[in-house]
Amino acid sequence: MRYSFLFLFLFLFLFLAYSNLLGQKKNIEFTKENFSNLPELEEALDNIKKGDLCGKTGQLKNLTSLDYYLLAYKFNSENSKLNSKIGLYYLNKGDKKNSLFYLKKAYELDNNISSDIHYILGKVYQLNMNFDMAIREYNLFNNSLLSEEFKRLPDFVVKRLKECENGKILMKTPINVLIENIGKIVNSKYPDYSPVITADESLLYFTSRKENSTGGVKDQNDNQYFEDIYVTTKNEKDEYLTPVNIGKPLNTNGHDATVGLSFDGQQMFVYNGDANGDIYLCDLKGDKWSSPELLPETINTDMHESSACMNFDGNIIYFVSDRLDDNMGGRDIFMSKKNKKGKWSQATNLGPIINTEYDEDGVYMHPDGKTLYFSSKGHNSMGGYDVFKSIIQSTGEWSKPINLGFPINTSDDDVYFVMSANGKHGYYSSAKDGGFGEKDIYRITFIENKVENIKESVHVTLLKGIVADATSKKPIEASIEIIDNEKNEVITTFNSNSSSGRYLIALPSGKNYGISVNAAGYLFYSENINFADTSQFQEIIINVNLGKISLGSKIILKNIFFDYAKATLNTESISELERLKKLLIENPNLKIEISGHTDIQGTQKINLVLSEERAKAVVDYLMINGISPKRLQYKGYGSSVPVDNNSTEIGRQNNRRVEFKIISNSF
């Protein structure tokens, strides 16, 4: 009985050992003992050497390292080191699935292929969103270390484990979005990334490493074509058309990349990699871009600056830098403000709420003027860069950044996120499975705004239109001022495009705005728009036809305000009155009539008196501020000259107005 038990135990032991040997793959070395065909063996070894050489020099005879390795793989697919080389090549190129296949096989053929194989496998499992297996491999790597090695272990493994836990949490509550590759018309087999858009999404600029680059040569560091900037426009079917290389002077023989775009598409930040990497600014003049101008030393340093954007009024630049001074670690987000002289202030770090000890990049301020989007390797990232958002509070403090969540964010790099003014679409570049190249550009459609991380409504008005000559209808390059009427301050000044006459600006809600359009030789145009804090996104089109300064020309002064049923000018009227004064000073031969008008409500007598008193109040202001009374007349017309229907509130509001008319241009 005793011997029978021992015999059974020995049999089971040998059976399990033999079964294990049968299940374990055999690592086959490239040796004469294993292969009798010596010429083919030598050729395979030569291909491996050439593949290794390509990894250092770029390529040989138009073949990459992978091409040579795969030739050797056809001869012997069961070699651990060769599988490892192929797996690492795919890993460096962002091909997560193929990388996992070959690295797993390398480990199965030789469990001792490298001391960090479990860390590498953990990284690849993480990239493939298999967080449980990644955690298992990272822990196996930790357990394989000797006590002294473990003490010296950097915290990157601990961070990797935390990222995996973050990933598991975020994947449990995916947000309701549709993520679409914007298609092979825009995306290519080459890396396409860093999209920037106008606020209305009509134009999309991006960076690509396509073969038709300006210089037509490759960067020896990574054997890819130098970066160039491209533009694509959207048609009526919501489709982006074939991209066009925007050419010189923005694109050079070196690296040129999109960094940021003003909301109207008239200014672009570009990155130039000739030195340490600096940010330049260029302007669209008609249909031609100006030569990029280097931003000042308050922004650019001898370190690396990348990724920049402006706020809605163009008076703040947010950008990314790895400068040593005032740094939280790695790349941080900084800001610089424009002073009254148009100079950019010394940059300041946004602080520890936004910036971490890890890298931040891809900064973008939404047109609402308060919501900052950026990518970070810190916070609760699930791996690589994740996209976050933070909102600046009334106190000036930033809210705790919120991860936009899965599936927008993955365990790979998700960066260069921008958002349309209406909040419906986001754009970013990502290395997703099924793409056309290493990185592609994707559009995110937010199905609903009920999820915690994107639940805010968009409080922005998109104001756009065309400025043209009232008679010829030809486009005019005009200066457009946006005024905070309550503060009587000019918020921003910009120009309509000289070729198309187009203008566009995004205005956050919660202000009473005055809009003034001016061009030499023309009467100015003014408009008033008042948005409550609760105003939702809206798009307003105001086409402006400017009339030339001539006898009989007249305009409505839409930013003149009075107390109800009184002739007392409100302080909000000062900016408009100053524009009228400036026009008269610049044109000393003009003599004008100021006219007051009311709606049909009230008696005719009261309306005549009120309208005349209001016209006189404007004339009094001009005389007090230096305009000769001989050049000024005033008259009240009551409700006798309506410009709209008095049966509606909007019509009555339009009829309550102050106008001026040129009655002589030879004073």
Image (cartoon, rainbow, N blue to C red):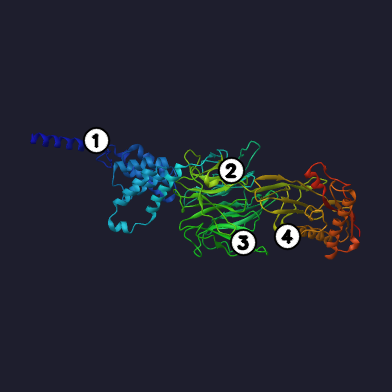
Badge 2 amino acid: His
Residue 425, numbered circle: 2
Separation of residues labelled 2 and 1 (CA atoms)? 55 Å
Q: Position of residue 32 (x, y in %)?
A: 26, 41
**392 left or right of 111 in image:** right
SS at badge 2: strand
Dot 1: within a 10 Å radius of its alpha carbon, few (fewer than 14), some, or many (20 or more) residues? Answer: few
Lower sequence index among marks 3 and 4: 3
SS at badge 3: strand
Badge 4 amino acid: Asn
SS at badge 1: helix
Separation of residues labelled 3 and 2 (CA atoms)? 28 Å
Of 126 and 632, nearer the camera is 632
Residue 560 found in image quarter: bottom right
Dot 2: within a 10 Å radius of its alpha carbon, few (fewer than 14), some, or many (20 or more) residues? Answer: some
Residue 491 found in image quarter: bottom right
Lower sequence index among marks 4 and 1: 1
**310 left or right of 223 in image:** right
Q: Position of residue 512 (x, y in %)?
A: 71, 54
Residue picked out by circle 4? 488
Of 311 and 593, nearer the camera is 593
In this rendering, the answer to whether 242 lies above or below 488 is above
Lower sequence index among marks 2 and 1: 1
Is label 2 or label 1 in front? 2
| Location of the C terminus (image quadrant) | bottom right
Badge 1 amino acid: Leu
Residue 22, numbered circle: 1
Residue picked out by circle 3? 337
What is the number of callouts on the image? 4
